Image (cartoon, helix red, strand yellow):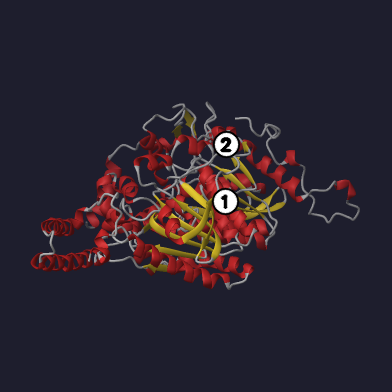
């Protein structure tokens, strides 16, 4: 390796080779194979306009579509004193895998925490990034969820978690397994403060993540078609030596089996969350309020802040 | 002589199984066996020879078991003659009264639970059971529980809470069952609730890994005040085989994965994940089951006596703090 191969050659190659049409203008839907134009995809919350397939969404976009006017404050993740506690190495070092994921996503780990208003009500959101090592849960993610819970309590805010994860991060061995009880404690902290804890299950949510905080929400919402389960498909197929039925472990399947409260299209997610939070946070008739309402505290009507379609049909897919 | 011989302590109906790395021991014991058959009248020379061979066996065992590799530990933890939960109950619990069912769907024999008396203490005792015969293994689904198993465990923990009884769990499972029916009935939710229930108890809960502590299926019963491990048991986020097939793309690297995962009791104690290692007799628990079980009983009793002295509310918050502190000790 020298500076010629590292910096000169690529530049020459870039000059010589014909500039390719950037292929990220068009995205091929992994469900229906149709090509979708990037701008259209963005406006449609990364949902395929042909088949309504809900594609992966990066945490920033998720936060932007969630909070009022797309405004929120991200908080720094708790600093990790030990980065690779087991000095884990498979075909690659874990510390290298981490660095790669950090370079690829620009994030420290597989989760992002932010707080802001949702229909004027305070909320803390914890959003997983599947692009970061499959959204796997290690110490950093566990610490972040605990931080999110503490923040929710401090701000008397709801906690809304958007998992998207293959499960525990194997490279942290037993420490990743220990994030199961730790994140369960995070949910207890929020619930003991009488604050709402919602889970929005996004594709995919499996393994130790599902088997801990993600299945302990006061209310479980799920995005259409999301894979949600404990064991991975391959493990099950190897165990029972059978092909799995169509739709197995999809959000709709979980709805049918009583594991989630509703399947909500991404377009209707914000409105649904605001409606639920409003019902929980303001349990009394507004007519009984006789004192002057302080300016700025009144919440705008629900249908103003949401798209007009679908707010009444939360489970339509 | 025979009565004191640890090698004949095994019940006759149990077939002796030797692991690969126990070959030298197996050979020596084969020789002893032959000599014994020759000696019908207590021939002095033969008795002497047997004695020599036996001390060789002991030396060999000591050498082998002192430096077991993680992968060898995995094999010992899964040894078919290793004491199972049923043996723990049989040896250490009197008046054991099994309680069945999750009151919702069914009875899962992979998790056995009930009330019994352990060294004088009434306790709710719950464990995963792999089974010893083919018939039993099928009945217990090889110790891999389904949601109704975890829901039964949860029900029994709540019963313990109501009557202020301590909870003792014993874990020996490859993991929660990965199957269609388990998924249908909410395996993930059942495990999550079980962890939640462990953490919410205001009575003492002590968990002991006696063989395999496999992933979520193990931690579901091990979010405890004290987590103990038998010397040659393992506790891991994923089986070495599973880890190898994902990260190395080949199950053949299970040995490497076993090393990388740090799943031995010794590693976990160093990381402060577990509280205590319970020593096993020479040649591991499968050679001298009663000795192993007695030392298990002593360790659990000691922990229990310490915990019953702590008041209910601080017990719960201490348990919580313990898990919150875990990652801070993550250095190896």
Residue B67 horizontal/vertical position (percent): 24, 65
Quarter of the image with the N terminus of chain B is: bottom left
Circle 1 Cα neighbour tier, 10 Å, few/some/many (<14 / 14–19 / ≥20): many
* SS category of the residue bearing label 2: helix
Viewer-side residue, A262 vs B12 = B12
Q: Mark number for residue A167?
A: none
Task: Left or right? Give the position of A222 relative to B244.
Answer: right
Residue B273 horizontal/vertical position (percent): 43, 65
Q: Chain of mark 2?
A: A
As drawn, the residue found furthest toward the front would be: B41
Residue B121 horizontal/vertical position (percent): 55, 65
**Quarter of the image holding residue B287?**
bottom left
Q: Residue at x 62, y 59 (%)?
A: B161
Task: Left or right? Give the position of A17 relative to A293.
Answer: left
Whether residue B110 is visible here, answered yes or no, is yes
Contact, CB < 8 Å: mark 2 with mark 1?
no
Quarter of the image with the C terminus of chain B is: bottom left
* SS category of the residue bearing label 1: helix
Disc count in the image? 2
Whether residue A227 is visible here, answered yes or no, is no
Task: Left or right? Give the position of B108 relative to A82.
Answer: right
Viewer-side residue, B109 vs B214 = B109
Q: Residue at x 12, y 58 (%)?
A: B31
Q: Chain of mark 1?
A: B
Q: Are marks 2 and 1 on the same chain?
A: no
Circle 2 Cα neighbour tier, 10 Å, few/some/many (<14 / 14–19 / ≥20): few
Residue A222 horizontal/vertical position (percent): 58, 39
- The label nearer to you, 2 versus 1, is 1
Which residue position holds label 1? B154
Which residue position holds label 2? A43
Viewer-side residue, A279 vs B173 = B173
What is the C-alpha distance between the residues marked 2 and 1?
46 Å
């Amino acid at each position: 390796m020298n500076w010629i191969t590292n910096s000169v050659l690529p530049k020459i190659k870039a000059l010589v080779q014909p500039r390719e049409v950037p292929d990220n203008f068009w995205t091929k839907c992994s469900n229906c194979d149709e090509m979708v134009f990037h701008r259209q995809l963005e406006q449609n919350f990364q949902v395929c306009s042909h088949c309504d397939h809900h594609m992966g969404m990066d945490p920033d976009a998720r936060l932007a579509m969630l909070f009022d006017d797309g405004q929120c404050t991200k908080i720094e993740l708790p600093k990790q004193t030990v980065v690779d506690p087991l000095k884990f190495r498979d075909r690659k070092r874990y510390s290298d895998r981490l660095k790669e994921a950090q370079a690829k996503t620009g994030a420290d780990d597989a989760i992002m925490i932010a707080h802001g208003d949702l229909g004027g009500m305070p909320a803390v959101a914890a959003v997983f990034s599947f692009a970061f090592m499959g959204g796997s849960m290690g110490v950093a993610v566990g610490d972040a969820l605990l931080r999110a819970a503490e923040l929710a309590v401090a701000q008397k805010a709801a906690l809304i978690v958007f998992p998207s994860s293959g499960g525990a991060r194997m490279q942290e061995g037993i420490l990743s397994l220990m994030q199961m009880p730790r994140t369960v404690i995070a949910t207890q902290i929020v619930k003991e403060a009488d604050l709402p804890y919602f889970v929005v299950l996004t594709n995919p949510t499996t393994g130790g993540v599902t088997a801990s905080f993600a299945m302990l929400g006061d209310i479980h919402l799920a995005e259409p078609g999301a894979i949600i389960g404990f064991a991975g498909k391959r493990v099950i197929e190897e165990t029972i030596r059978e092909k799995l039925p169509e739709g197995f472990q999809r959000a709709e399947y979980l709805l049918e089996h009583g594991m989630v409260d509703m399947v909500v299209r991404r377009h209707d997610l914000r409105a649904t969350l605001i409606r639920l939070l409003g019902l929980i946070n303001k349990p009394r008739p507004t007519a009984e309020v006789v004192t002057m309402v302080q300016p700025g505290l009144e919440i705008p009507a629900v249908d103003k802040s949401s798209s007009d379609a679908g707010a009444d049909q939360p489970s339509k897919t | 002589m025979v009565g004191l011989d640890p090698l004949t302590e095994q019940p006759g109906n149990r077939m002796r199984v030797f692991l690969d790395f126990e070959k030298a021991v197996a050979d020596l014991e084969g020789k002893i066996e032959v000599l014994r058959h020759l000696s019908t009248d207590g021939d002095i020379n033969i008795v002497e020879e047997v004695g020599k061979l036996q001390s060789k066996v002991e030396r060999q065992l000591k050498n082998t078991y002192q430096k077991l590799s993680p992968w060898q530990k995995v094999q010992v933890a899964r040894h078919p003659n290793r004491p199972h939960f049923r043996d723990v109950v049989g040896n250490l619990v009197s008046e054991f009264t099994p309680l069945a069912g999750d009151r919702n769907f069914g009875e899962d024999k992979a998790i056995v639970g009930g009330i019994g008396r352990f060294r004088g203490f009434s306790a709710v005792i719950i464990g995963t059971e792999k089974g010893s015969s083919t018939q039993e293994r099928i009945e217990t689904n090889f110790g891999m529980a389904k949601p109704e198993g975890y829901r039964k465990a949860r029900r029994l923990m709540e019963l313990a809470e109501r009557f202020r009884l301590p909870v003792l769990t014993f874990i020996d499972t490859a993991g929660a069952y990965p199957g269609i029916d388990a998924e249908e009935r909410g395996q993930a939710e059942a495990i999550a609730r079980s962890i939640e229930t462990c953490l919410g108890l205001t009575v003492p809960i002590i968990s002991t890994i006696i063989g395999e502590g496999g992933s979520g299926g193990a931690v579901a019963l091990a979010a405890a005040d004290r987590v103990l491990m038998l010397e040659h048991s393992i506790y891991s986020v994923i089986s070495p085989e599973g880890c190898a097939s994902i990260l190395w793309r080949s199950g053949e690297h299970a040995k490497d994965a076993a090393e990388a995962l740090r799943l031995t009791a010794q590693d976990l104690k160093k990381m402060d994940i577990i509280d205590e290692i319970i020593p096993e007799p020479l040649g591991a628990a499968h050679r001298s089951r009663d000795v192993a079980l007695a030392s298990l009983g002593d360790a659990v009793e000691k922990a229990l006596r310490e915990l019953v002295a702590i008041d209910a509310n601080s017990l719960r918050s201490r348990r919580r703090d313990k898990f919150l502190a875990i990652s801070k000790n993550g250095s190896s």
